[in-house]
Amino acid sequence: MNTQCLPCLISLAFAIDQLYNKRMLIRKGFKYRLKPDRFEETDMSRTAGCNRFAWNTMLAIQKERLENRLSCLSYNQMAVVLLDMKTEFVFLKEAHSQTLQQTLKDLDRAIKDAFDKKSPKRFPRFRKKGVNDHFRYPQGFKINGNVVYLPMIGWVPLFKSREIKGTPKNVTVSRNGKSWDVAVQTEYEVAEPAPQSVTACGIDMGVTRFATLSDGTLYEPLNSFRNLESRLALEQRKLSRKKLYSQNWLKQKAVINRIHTRIANARKDYLHKTSTAISENQAMIVLEDLKVVNMSASARGTADQPGRNVKQKSGLNKAILDQGWSEFRRMLQYKQLWRGGLVVAVPPQHTSQRCPVCEFVHAGNRKTQAAFRCLNCGHTDNADHVAAINILAAGHAVLACGENGSQSASVKREPTRAKAQASAPQGIIGL
Ligand SMILES: [Zn+2]
């Protein structure tokens, strides 16, 4: 390289800067409980209602188009329909227009995700009153000390449990049982972290054991739903005996919502603690590339072709969804990102049938759900532990293939979703 040449010097400086000053963008959410007065509460309730109406009406239109073999409306087309809707349903003007636009963007995203060929998500559903009521402001909000300004609603006090870090990008207001929360999403840059630990582990996720690590650590399932299930069933029976939408019905509904909230909170807490503990100790985490949506698909089948093992499968579905596997993976991914670690996904074939000692693969190696006994060399171990070891080995193999190592790590750290999906090599989870 000619060091006298200015462009060369600039590109050299740029390369050095890239090497030593790697920055990464972190997006983080900060959630607070709001303290609205009764007028603000009414306004929030109304805004949430308008957003629900916009979602449901637009979803009905999209479904009708699909039934008539037409393509779904794009976000821009939906925005035009929204303008027409506002002249027909004047009450929509009581909600801030940007929140409605955000709702349509969410719907657009949800439909695109549902038709994603690689990992299809569930098709969006109609929203029910009181279930997951929320709306989002992309701008126009202000945060000042212990109050947040929500356009068309006003300054609402909040319980500030911790300081906000970074530049606020949007706020989401949501109903949580009887109370209202606000989540502030912020963005900030940090120097790209170097992994604190040098170890790697494979994780086998199961129903009887939530997670088994290749180093032998195991996490029992929380089954928060199972524990509260009988209580929930009892309260739901009480609800069924009440007159629909009567005062007593509403009271009972609130009791049920509180149980649901408790279940959700307990699960979230458990997933956070587990994923943090694993992420803190491992530089590389290898997971099976299971499609949770497919695994938990109903076995019921159609009227012409009834499914098999419907009852057993439904029990398994409940257990899988109760475990929150996909949420757990998502947490591991972003926690590894913050710590400069890596998450690798490997194909799930034969992970529970291969002997880690002699590599012998046979279905008979796994006599029962829990016990592994190699038919070739007689090696015995817990089946989940064997699977975790095999998963780790498969992860090392993925990284050893070609140049992958450092490059895949940087691809994984790409902040934008579309980019990562487009360029992620096989076996690496895009963000
Ligand atoms: Zn063996």
Image (cartoon, helix red, strand yellow):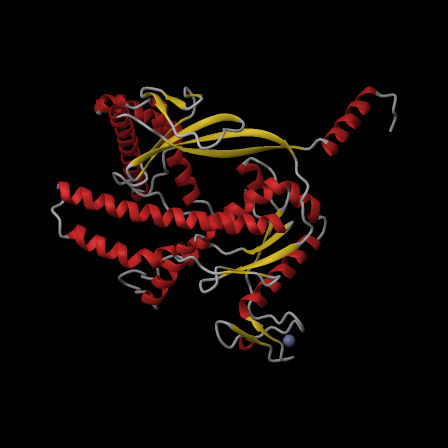
Quarter of the rendered structure image containing ligand 1: bottom right
What is the tally of numbered marks visible in this picture?
0
Residue at figure coordinates x 44%, y 33% from the top left: 161
Residue at figure coordinates x 34%, y 27% from the top left: 100
Q: Position of residue 352 (x, y in %)?
A: 55, 68
Relative vertical location of residue 376 with respect to residue 143 in this rendering, above or below: below
User: Which quadrant holds the C terminus?
Assistant: top right
Q: Position of residue 215 (x, y in %)?
A: 62, 61
Give the left or right position of residue 358, taking residue 41 as reference: right
Residue at figure coordinates x 41%, y 50% from the top left: 267
Q: Is residue 414 visible to the viewer in this orientation of the structure? A: yes
Q: Is residue 120 visible to the viewer in this orientation of the structure? A: no
Q: Position of residue 257 (x, y in %)?
A: 28, 45
Q: Nearer the viewer, residue 217 or 118?
A: 217
* The image quarter in which residue 226 lies: bottom left
Q: Nearer the viewer, residue 169 or 60?
A: 169
Residue at figure coordinates x 27%, y 28% from the top left: 41
User: Which quadrant holds the N terminus?
Assistant: top right
Q: Position of residue 139 (x, y in %)?
A: 43, 22
